[in-house]
């Protein structure tokens, strides 16, 4: 039976990782409890920071449950395929560096998983698959992700050719989805006044349909 | 990057009074155009700073109307591609919104063609898209408020 470096609670990070990735270990559950005790707050903080960086009014209203969801996904990611991800962590010989590198590694996982989830939620909103979302809460994204997502959407919608009508339609779609404008708001400038509600609905639906064909690009 | 441009002419000490954003000021201007006799009466923006802001917008609009080439320049200089980071064409050109929202349709349309260039640029430039959305959103809500419809929620 493996021995703890200190009695009971004080497992080293190496021991935690060893027991957390070994279901047969008698310390398996204990090690996971220790893992949670030490790193749960760190993971939550990192996820929350990432979520807030998206500057989305919509997200702020659902922040706690979003953070909770992402936390559960990170733990799942660490545990799948017999803890493959956790096993793959390579730290340092030096204990202090080992801990520091682990925190950096964990922060990266939080960052990636949060972005993945946030992109998914963003997609759901753009595709109107989020009926519970409160109205009036427009999407805003942090600058890093914003340009890339926005450009991806436009390039998919634009397709291979540019034409005048399509540029207007893409704009209408982005106003409706990304900016959260109502039909009345879209029709505010006099140039848009002639557009009927039905036209806006048709344009948005057509754009959504086109975007759906490229779903894989966004995940 | 979403820039909230408040009335820079607002003097210190008027925090209790509403500071008009560009979009809101354009709504006030537009509603004055529609009902000049009601100009400013009993409205919360009747603050010296806002008055100055509105006057400056009126002056700039008159200048745009008087010099067709200024109006034309506004629309023809819209970049085709996206703006460089840290610079947004629309955030830097409030006169564009002045022309786009408050000038007579014909005057602006003559200079802008069919707005293809504007849409193309905004589709290429997230910053300008955000700036445009911000101004239009403020404008819409203020218009609703001034016309007695109050706040209107957007619906996705």
Image (cartoon, coloured by chain):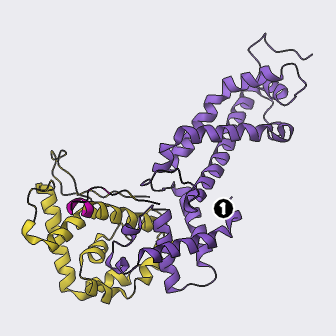
Instruction: In the rendered view, tell whether residue A105 sits above or below residue B24.
Output: above
Q: Residue at x 45, y 49 (%)?
A: A57
As rendered, which of A103 and A146 lies closer to the eye? A146
Secondary element under disc 1, as helix, strand or loop, is helix
Palette colour of chain A: purple
Q: Left or right of B7: which side holds A7?
A: right
- Give left or right: position of A195 versus B101: right
In percent of width and height, residue B74 lies at 32, 80
In this rendering, the count of numbered labels is 1
Residue that sits furthest to the front in the current view: A198
Which residue is at 60% across, 51% downward?
A: A118
Q: Which residue is mark 1?
A: A218
- Image x and y of residue B153, in percent: 37, 56
**Residue A216, position in %: x, y?**
71, 63
The answer to whether residue B123 shows anywhere in this view is no
Q: Is residue A200 above or below residue A122?
A: below
Q: Give the colour chain B carries in the figure.
A: yellow
User: Which chain is indicated by disc 1?
Assistant: A
The magenta stretch spans residue B146:
yes
**Segment colored magenta:** B143-152
Q: Quadrant of the N terminus of chain B?
A: bottom left
What secondary structure is the stretch in magenta mostly built from? Answer: loop
Residue B118: quadrant of the picture: bottom left
């Amino acid at each position: 039976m493996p021995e703890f470096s200190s009695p009971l609670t004080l497992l080293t990070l190496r021991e935690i990782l060893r027991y957390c990735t070994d279901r047969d270990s008698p310390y398996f559950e204990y090690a996971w409890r220790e893992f949670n005790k030490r790193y749960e707050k760190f993971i939550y903080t990192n996820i929350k920071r990432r979520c807030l960086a998206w500057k989305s009014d919509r997200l702020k209203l659902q922040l706690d449950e979003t953070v909770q969801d992402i936390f559960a996904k990170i733990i799942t990611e660490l545990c799948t395929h017999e803890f493959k991800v956790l096993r793959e962590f390579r730290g340092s010989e030096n204990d202090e560096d080992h801990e520091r590198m682990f925190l950096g590694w964990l922060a990266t996982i939080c960052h990636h998983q949060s972005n993945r989830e946030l992109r998914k939620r963003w997609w759901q909103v753009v595709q109107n698959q989020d009926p519970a979302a409160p109205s009036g809460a427009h999407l805003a994204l942090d600058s890093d992700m914003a340009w890339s997502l926005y450009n991806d959407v436009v390039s998919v919608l634009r397709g291979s050719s540019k034409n005048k009508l399509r540029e207007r339609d893409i704009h209408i779609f982005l106003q409706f989805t990304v900016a959260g404008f109502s039909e009345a708001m879209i029709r505010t400038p006099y140039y848009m006044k002639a557009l009927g509600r039905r036209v806006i609905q048709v344009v948005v639906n057509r754009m959504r349909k086109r975007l759906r064909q490229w779903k894989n690009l966004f995940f | 990057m979403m820039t909230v441009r408040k009335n820079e002419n607002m003097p210190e000490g008027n925090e209790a009074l509403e500071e008009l954003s560009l979009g809101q000021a354009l709504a006030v201007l537009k509603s004055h155009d529609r009902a000049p006799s009601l100009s400013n009466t009993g409205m919360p923006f009747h603050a010296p700073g806002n008055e100055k802001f509105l006057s400056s917008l009126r002056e700039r609009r008159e200048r745009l109307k008087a010099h067709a080439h200024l109006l034309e320049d506004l629309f023809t200089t819209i970049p085709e591609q996206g703006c460089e980071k840290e610079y947004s064409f629309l955030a830097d050109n409030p006169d564009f919104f002045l022309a786009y929202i408050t000038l007579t349709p014909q005057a602006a349309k003559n200079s802008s063609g069919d707005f293809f260039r504007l849409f193309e640029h905004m589709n290429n430039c997230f910053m300008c898209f955000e700036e445009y959305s911000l101004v239009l959103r403020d404008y819409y809500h203020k218009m609703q408020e001034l016309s007695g419809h109050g706040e209107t929620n957007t619906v996705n």
